[in-house]
Image: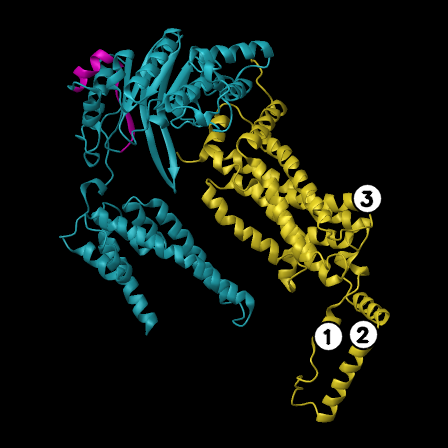
């Protein structure tokens, strides 16, 4: 009679247990204080402007997305490749790769959740503004937390896939900066991209993370202070006009700038000017609606599924590793 | 002008390569096929992998060149194509240097000759091709053939031990079929502890992987009456394979390491209490019980080896295979470990061990399997039989001297592998296929 051995579900729990023991004994917990330190550094930079002005929100949410991707990458970039020979041995003894990856997925949920809670706590402690209106769950903090969690988790799964694909930690750590740069450059919000480059943004976690965070922070309803800042920084005494502008015209321009700056000293006028500027620079990608936010979450979740499936497929070829 | 020079130097390269190929015993006309000739040159100097990637990168670069002809020279696409070509050109140069180094080594020259090849390949190929002063080393020339043939015999044991009838184990390496092992037929009775001896690259691990069913070969492997290949999903739990390194998680405890191995390898019909009892029993057998709460990282070399063996022994396998279990252990600890393995064999198991220091524990073994590379560099059976007969067969007094006798000359050995393979085949034929 063919006797049964532990199946996929049982094996998953064996490895979940193993991973939690590693959390304690192998000092994997270190990623948690690291998340707090990074969040504190970022909050120091973004505290004054995020979720208050359009430009501040864009910079701030970009920085928050970066925290998530950084945390996710560091959680799992080395976890598989550093024990690859061990996995190969265990595969020989009947380990199912789907169970192994499923165990990692469960364990990484715990890590990413802890990191998300830590990041939100640090933001609150350092008085960084967070979204106040909920579009999906009824709690703005939970909406915000879900986006941060999913972004961290998707980055985590991408790094897990790389870790499953490569054969050693050196290779993994060589690839990681490239992935990070790709995520940052092609986030689609921060750097202005055109044509095919813009289409590439759809393949990044950062694009969907940034979009969801901006949507939750009501980006399109915020004032835009870019024009006002430019106006304030102009020193009309030293402005040199282009040669093709007549002297009379130049004087006219100087007069207009000075006049506008004088007007902007009135707070009410200034605020309505900034709101008008914001109204004119709305971005559909950041539309504050439940549909848009859920679309972003689904897109990020699809990456989670894709990378976990790819991780299993990569590990199925582990027997081909050369001795 | 540059184009004409390129064509002329390419022609010289091809002509020089033709003669070089001939010196290696290959078909000269292959040098006339662009792209393929680089791969073939790599093959001549045993750098097939480098040759393959050079071929691949060349195809990519040429492909990109063709595509760029249809792209606007001012466009970003053209710039991307140009950068991509450059990116692939860098490894191309590195690979060509590797192949040139392989070539000068094959001709028994110093590596610095490769510098001249890099800059004046056409001239150097002509020189190496036409000059009689430049001849490849014997080891690189021609397709050698082993005379010792032993095909399609089938040995059957008494139906209780391990019977191995391996006709061939092949692999394809960059389009080239390589025979790693050939004609290995033997039966090992239960209760025997067998030493697997062989020089580096003789195919010991390949043989063991084929026997365990981990890497399938053209073979019939049976444990008792059960076919390992046909019933692999069931049989893999009845075969314990202890790999060379201590492949365990350092930050787990000894008890959990064994307990998790038990959860993977023991059947689900076993009650948790029975599994716990089995874990304790195995920890006790291998002297690890007092260390059960210790982290693996805190164990000594000998303790780690015992833990690694215990992980496989947990399922009480019929066939127990160990790849260099004594590496890094001193004589006393190693002896202790082998005595433990002897005890396991005495319980009616088959234990096969690879070790590079067999003489200190040879009295514990029943039989010896000697694998050696024949003239075709294929792993062959040079001897299988009792320990006390092996010395007479090889005319040597120790296992280490036997190893020296079968090792290739370039490995510091006597290069007599082919002789002993033939002698063993003759002996087997004379005995009518009885091993």
Residue A167 is inside the magenta segment:
no
Q: First in sequence, mark 3 or 1: give its number.
A: 3
For disc 3, the marked residue is A139
For disc 1, the marked residue is A232
Q: Which residues are magenta?
A: B377-394
Residue B390 is inside the magenta segment:
yes
For disc 2, the marked residue is A264
* Chain represented in yellow: A
Q: Nearer the viewer, residue B53 or A183?
A: A183
Q: Nearer the viewer, residue B27 or B49?
A: B49
For the residues labelled 3 and 1, the Cα–Cα distance comes to 38 Å
For the residues labelled 1 and 2, the Cα–Cα distance comes to 9 Å
- Residue A116 appears at what percent x and percent y? 68, 42
For the residues labelled 2 and 3, the Cα–Cα distance comes to 36 Å
Same chain under badges 2 and 3? The reply is: yes
Q: Secondary structure at mark 1?
A: helix
Label 2 packing within 10 angstroms: few (<14), some (14-19), many (20+): some
Inspect this view and state whether residue B30 appears: no
């Amino acid at each position: 009679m063919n006797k049964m051995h532990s199946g996929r579900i049982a094996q998953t729990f064996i490895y979940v247990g193993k991973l939690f023991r590693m959390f304690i004994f192998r000092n994997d917990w270190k990623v948690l204080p690291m998340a707090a330190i990074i969040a504190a550094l970022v909050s120091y930079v973004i505290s004054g402007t995020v979720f208050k002005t359009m430009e501040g929100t864009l910079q701030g949410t970009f920085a928050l997305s970066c925290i998530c991707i950084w945390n996710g990458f560091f959680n799992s970039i080395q976890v598989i490749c550093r024990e690859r020979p061990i996995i190969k041995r265990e595969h020989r003894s009947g380990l199912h790769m789907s169970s192994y990856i499923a165990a990692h997925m469960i364990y990484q949920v715990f890590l990413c959740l802890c990191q998300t809670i830590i990041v939100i706590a640090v933001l609150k402690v350092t008085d960084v503004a967070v979204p106040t209106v909920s579009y999906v769950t009824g709690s703005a903090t939970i909406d915000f937390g879900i986006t941060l969690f999913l972004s961290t988790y998707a980055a985590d799964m991408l790094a897990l896939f790389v870790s499953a694909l490569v054969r050693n930690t050196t290779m993994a750590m060589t690839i990681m900066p490239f992935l990070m740069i790709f995520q940052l450059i092609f986030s689609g919000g921060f750097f202005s991209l055109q044509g095919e480059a813009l289409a590439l943004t759809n393949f990044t976690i950062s694009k969907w993370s940034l979009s969801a965070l901006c949507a939750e922070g009501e980006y399109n309803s915020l004032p835009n202070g870019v024009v006002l800042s430019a106006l304030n920084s102009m020193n009309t005494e030293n402005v040199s006009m282009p040669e093709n502008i007549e002297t009379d015209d130049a004087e006219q321009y100087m007069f207009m700038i000075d006049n506008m700056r004088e007007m902007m000293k009135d707070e009410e006028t200034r605020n309505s000017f900034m709101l008008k500027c914001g109204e004119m620079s709305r971005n559909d990608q950041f539309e504050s609606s439940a549909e848009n936010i859920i679309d972003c979450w689904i897109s990020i979740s699809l990456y989670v599924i894709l990378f976990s499936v790819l991780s299993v497929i990569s590990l199925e070829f582990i027997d081909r590793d050369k001795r | 002008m540059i184009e004409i020079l390129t064509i002329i130097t390419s022609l010289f390269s091809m002509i020089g390569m033709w003669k070089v190929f001939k010196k290696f015993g290959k078909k000269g006309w292959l040098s006339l096929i662009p792209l393929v000739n680089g791969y073939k040159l790599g093959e001549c100097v045993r750098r097939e992998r480098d040759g393959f990637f050079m071929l691949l990168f060349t195809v990519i670069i040429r492909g990109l060149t063709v595509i760029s002809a249809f792209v606007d020279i001012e466009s970003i696409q053209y710039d991307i194509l140009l950068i991509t070509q450059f990116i692939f050109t860098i490894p191309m140069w590195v690979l060509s240097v590797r192949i040139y180094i392989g070539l000068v080594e094959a001709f028994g020259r110093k590596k610095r000759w490769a510098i001249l090849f890099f800059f004046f390949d056409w001239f150097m190929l002509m020189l190496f091709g036409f000059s009689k002063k430049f001849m490849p080393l014997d080891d690189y020339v021609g397709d050698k053939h082993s005379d010792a043939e032993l095909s399609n015999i089938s040995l059957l044991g008494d139906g209780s031990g391990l019977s191995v009838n391996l006709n061939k184990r092949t692999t394809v390496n960059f389009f080239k079929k390589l025979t790693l092992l050939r004609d290995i037929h033997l039966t090992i009775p239960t209760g025997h502890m067998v030493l697997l001896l062989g020089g580096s690259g003789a195919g010991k691990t390949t043989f063991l992987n084929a026997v365990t069913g981990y890497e399938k070969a053209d073979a019939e492997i049976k444990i008792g009456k059960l076919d390992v290949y046909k019933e692999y999903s069931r049989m893999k739990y009845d075969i314990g394979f202890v790999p060379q390194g201590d492949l365990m998680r350092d930050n787990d405890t000894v008890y959990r390491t064994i307990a998790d191995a038990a959860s993977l390898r023991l059947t689900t019909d076993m009650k948790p209490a029975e599994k716990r009892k089995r874990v304790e029993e195995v920890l006790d057998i291998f002297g690890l019980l007092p260390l059960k709460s210790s982290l693996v990282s805190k164990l000594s070399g000998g303790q780690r080896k015992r833990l690694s063996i215990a992980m496989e022994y947990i399922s009480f396998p019929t066939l127990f295979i160990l790849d260099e279990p004594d590496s890094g252990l001193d004589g006393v600890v190693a002896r202790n470990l082998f005595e433990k393995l002897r005890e396991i064999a005495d319980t009616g198991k088959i234990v096969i061990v690879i070790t590079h220091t067999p003489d200190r524990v040879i009295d514990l073994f029943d039989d010896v399997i000697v694998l050696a590379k024949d003239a075709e560099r294929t792993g062959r059976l040079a001897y299988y039989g009792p320990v006390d007969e092996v010395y007479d067969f090889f005319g040597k007094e120790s296992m280490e001297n036997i190893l020296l006798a079968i090792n290739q000359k370039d490995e510091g050995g006597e290069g007599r592998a082919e002789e002993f393979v033939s002698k063993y085949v003759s002996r087997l034929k004379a005995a009518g296929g009885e091993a």
